[in-house]
Amino acid sequence: MKIESRGLSRVGATFLILTILIVMIGAVAIFDIAYTTSRQAAPITSNTGSLSVNEPPKPVYITLTWEKSPEALQDRFTPYNIVVAQGDTVHITFIVNDSSAHTFTLGPPYNFQINVTTPGLTDDLTGNVFTTNATNNSPGVVIRGTPGNVTGTGTFVAKYAGIYEYFCFYHVQVGMFGYLTVLPNSAYNGTQATTSSSTPSGSQVSIEYGSAANITSVYFSPPTIVVVIGVNNTVTWTNNDIAAHTVTSDTGAFNSGNIAAGATWSYTFTSAGTYGYHCSYHPWMTGTVIVKS
């Protein structure tokens, strides 16, 4: 009886160990699924910016598709999280099998846009049907197809490390956006490139992204600029929005006319004074130039 009892104890112990192992494996699997799901649902984390790579820049080919989310019944990007290394050449193919227009838009500092708009597609912001192709695509972007089956392709270099939102201009308000993560790359030789807001003879003003839709608090940045005649009295406005704008003097002293998306306009001030100006298309957009002798 003692021998049988010992045998049963070994069996019981083995069974107990196997049960514990199965429970542990199941717990690890559940944790892994939960972690993966949370990463997919939250592409931005507090430590993303600390990640970096050291690899030669390479071409990266990304295919984005429009879809109607079955859960939210709203327009979405698939995928909505893109990760590349700094210096990579990113080739975007954006496929839209919809009756409405959609864009893949990256704001500053990239200012890149694929506007999949062709005659027959609908502008969901206004309800109007487009009769022409889009005119505000980035250089090199190609749009092909007909309503219900349209593809836009374009390329940009991921020069700037960081996390940047991409979105559809027509549907960002219903959640059609995603995130481009550009990992810092110590092998990228272009990291020393910088931009300057002024030069010895001129000053720069940015027409901010979102100004036309009135979704930002600053439209001309900086809203007030001080220049000195003979030092930096030539002011250049750069349109970083995806809509056209004007730089129009409140008193008629100057008028840029139409400044297309991505274009610039310069004006040299020769008389001291305070010059208020606005966008004739969007009256909420105002700015000031103070000219000192």
Image: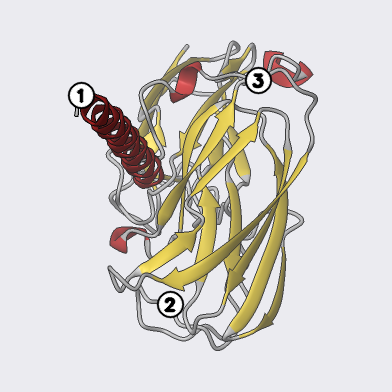
The residue under label 2 is 123
Q: Position of residue 201 (x, y in %)?
A: 64, 16
Residue 136 lies left or right of residue 38; in this view the side is right
**Measuring 35% from the left and 77% from the top, which residue is drawn there?**
126
Which amino acid type is shown beneath numbered disc 2? Asp
Label count reads 3
The image shows residue 96 at horizontal and vertical percentages of 56, 74
* Residue at the image point whose x is 50% and y is 43% from the top: 107
- Residue under pointer 3: 53
The span from disc 3 to disc 1 (Cα, nearest Å) is 64 Å
Label 1 Cα crowd, 10 Å radius (few <14 / some 14-19 / many 20+): few
Res 157 visible: yes
Q: Secondary structure at mark 1?
A: helix
Residue at screen point 54% across, 15% down: 229
Helix, strand or loop at mark 3: loop
Is the residue under label 1 in contact with that under label 2 (CB below 8 Å)?
no
Instruction: Say what amino acid the circle numbered 3 marks.
Output: Val
Q: Can see residue 274?
A: no
Horizontal side of residue 67 vs 136, given as left or right:
left
Provide residue 139's location: percent of width, then percent of height: 73, 53
Q: Is residue 105 above or below residue 127?
A: above
Which mark, residue 2? 1
Q: Nearer the viewer, mark 2 or mark 3?
A: 3
Q: Residues within 10 Å of mark 3 (few under 14, many from 20)?
A: some
Q: Nearer the viewer, residue 175 or 102?
A: 175
Along the polypeptide, which appears first: circle 2 or circle 3?
3
Give whichever of 44, 192 is nearer the camera. 44
